[in-house]
Amino acid sequence: MNDPAKKRGLGRGLSALLGEDKAIPEPGAKGELRLRIDQIHPGRFQPRRNFGDETMKSLVDSVIAQGILQPILVRPYPGKPGDYEILAGERRWRAAQKARLHEIPAVVRDLGDRAALEIALVENIQRQDLTPIEEAQGYKRLIDEFKHTQEALASALGLSRSHVANTLRLLSLPDPVQKMLGDGRLSAGHARALVMARDPEALAHKIVAAEMSVREAEGLVKTEHKHPGAKKPAHKNPNTLAIERELARHLGLKVSIAHGSRGGTLTIRYLSLDQLDEVLKKLRAKR
């Protein structure tokens, strides 16, 4: 995720979501207080799954030497009076535990679930802490659970709509390929090339084994489509292609339409029962 335009836009992401006076707090922020470590709970909307990276050790060393310099952002924990849920700063809270601190500075905000997910997502994207799959899952959750459109989501996060759309398309890849992307064996560029492949899993293994560059991976996918044994895709009407793209953007899944003189078929490709369930929810909501 080294898109310069993306970094520039994210500089105001939280301000756009919460208002100029409610961004992630700075040291000494208004309303700052100190909370016991055991009063604080991980964020339920935290998109990041892996905190065991090498940077955590350096953060722990910094906390031991200098303490927590920037307060974390929390909200009251539902159903647990006196306890708080992390909105931003979970790595600092985890580092404080490893450093054996008893309390840390925090700023409390009374925010809803949608804002909680948006803040957690923006903070991680700003710090480039998410894998492409975690980022895509965060976008999908905002769209599915909180009814964001791709355009509104991109605007709020300071991203291009094409970046959001291309990231969401990664979720159409088979689970083994998503795992390779999550553990770093494949880059986002490799994965984007594989989205249109006939057999993305087989090609992914070839790419990893040969340590191919993104450009080489793109060439491999093109070669697969030109293989003599492969069926050539039928030419489609531009209107049909436009409808396919519109449906794919709405559903976050690959869509294909085969239209003939007596009607046709609409194919929606899903890779898990969870994805199928999400499609059914969207279809039922239109009744």
Image: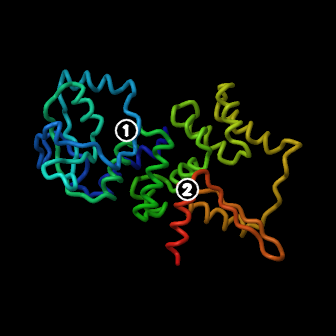
Residue 85 in percent (x, y) is at: 24, 47
> The residue tagged with tag 2: helix, strand or loop?
helix
Dot 1: few (<14), some (14–19), or many (≥20) neighbours within 10 Å?
A: few
Q: Who's the residue at 70% across and 66% down the image?
A: 266
Residue 143 in percent (x, y) is at: 45, 60
Q: Is residue 228 above or below residue 239?
A: above
User: Spatial distance from mark 2 to mark 1, Cα to Cα?
Assistant: 29 Å
- Between disc 2 and disc 1, whose residue precedes? 1
**Which kind of residue does numbered mark 1 sit on?**
Arg
State left or right for residue 132 relative to residue 268. left
Q: In this rendering, which labeled residue sits more in front, label 2 or label 1? A: 2
State left or right for residue 267 relative to residue 260. left
State left or right for residue 109 relative to residue 18. left
Q: Nearer the viewer, residue 42 or 237?
A: 42
Q: Who's the residue at 11% across and 49% down the image?
A: 31
- Which of the colour schemes (rainbow, by chain, secondary structure, one colour) is used? rainbow
Q: Which residue is mark 1?
A: 127
Q: Who's the residue at 71% across and 61% down the image?
A: 256
Residue 91 in percent (x, y) is at: 30, 35
Q: Which residue is mark 2?
A: 275
Circle number at residue 199: none
Residue 191 in percent (x, y) is at: 61, 41
Q: Who's the residue at 57% across and 30% down the image?
A: 185
Q: Quadrant of residue 206?
A: top right
> The residue tagged with tag 1: helix, strand or loop?
loop
Q: Nearer the viewer, residue 129 or 13?
A: 129
Q: How many marks?
A: 2
Q: Nearer the viewer, residue 30 or 129?
A: 129
**Which kind of residue does numbered mark 2 sit on?**
Gln
